[in-house]
Image: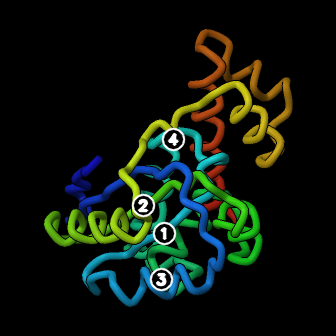
Amino acid sequence: MLKPVEEFGKHLVISGFRETHVKDVGAFLKTICSEEPSAVEIQLFNAHLVATWQHLYFAALNALTAFKNRENVSKSLAMETMRYASAQRQIRKAIELLGIKPQLSDIAILIIGENPEAVMSAFSQISRIFKTKPDETVLELTSQKMRQIKKAFEFSDIELEVVANEKDVKNALVELIIERMALLTTQR
């Protein structure tokens, strides 16, 4: 889905792919980097730990804000987005948590650029590389995925219950992740 982020003059595509089977992550990322238009930033995530499109949208907003305020840790917007999406200060830990791995078949994708045509072109190129059509259902929350996210982000039952007070548990989990990402900006 293409989303404008007017306050930054950017456009985002947030989507996913199912059954991708990336055997050599390094070679795969090199292929994407060699084919991507230089006007876009691309980041791939373990879709099993992405709590809806909102998770990646707010990670992108936080990363864009960090670059705007010159508070970024990473040199690339894509990597800064990974840091925020994982709610980790260290890039290595961010990649360990949310980065793609050879055994991973469901991948979430975030593409950021100024020109919507360049963003969509990059998205089409990645679809061709994956040899499959996008499947945004990999971003949706299931019971199993919620358990994985809760464990990976170390959310307690009490934390989830407090936030879920008058909301459903899925929305509460998304809110907790967004809050955890926001707290990352306060840590030095």
Are circles 4 and 2 on residues that touch, CB within 8 Å? no
Residue type at mark 4? Leu
Q: Residue furthest front?
A: 131
Residue type at mark 1? Gln
Q: Is residue 7 left or right of residue 127?
A: left
Residue 148 image offset from top left, x and y in percent: 77, 40
Residue 110 image offset from top left, x and y in percent: 42, 60
In primary-sequence order, the first of circles 4 and 2 is: 2
Which disc number belongs to residue 76? Answer: 3
Are circles 4 and 3 on residues that touch, CB within 8 Å? no
Which disc number belongs to residue 139? Answer: 4
Q: Which residue is mark 2?
A: 110
SS type, badge 1: strand
Q: Residue furthest top?
A: 166
In space, the residues marked 4 and 3 are separated at their CA atoms by 24 Å
Are circles 1 and 2 on residues that touch, CB within 8 Å? yes
Q: Is residue 127 left or right of residue 116?
A: right
In space, the residues marked 3 and 2 are separated at their CA atoms by 13 Å
Residue at figure coordinates x 42%, y 41% from the top left? 136
In primary-sequence order, the first of circles 4 and 3 is: 3
Name above or below for residue 100 compared with residue 72: above
Question: Of discs 3 and 1, which sits in the foreground?
Answer: 1
Q: Which residue is mark 1?
A: 43
Q: Quadrant of residue 177?
A: top right
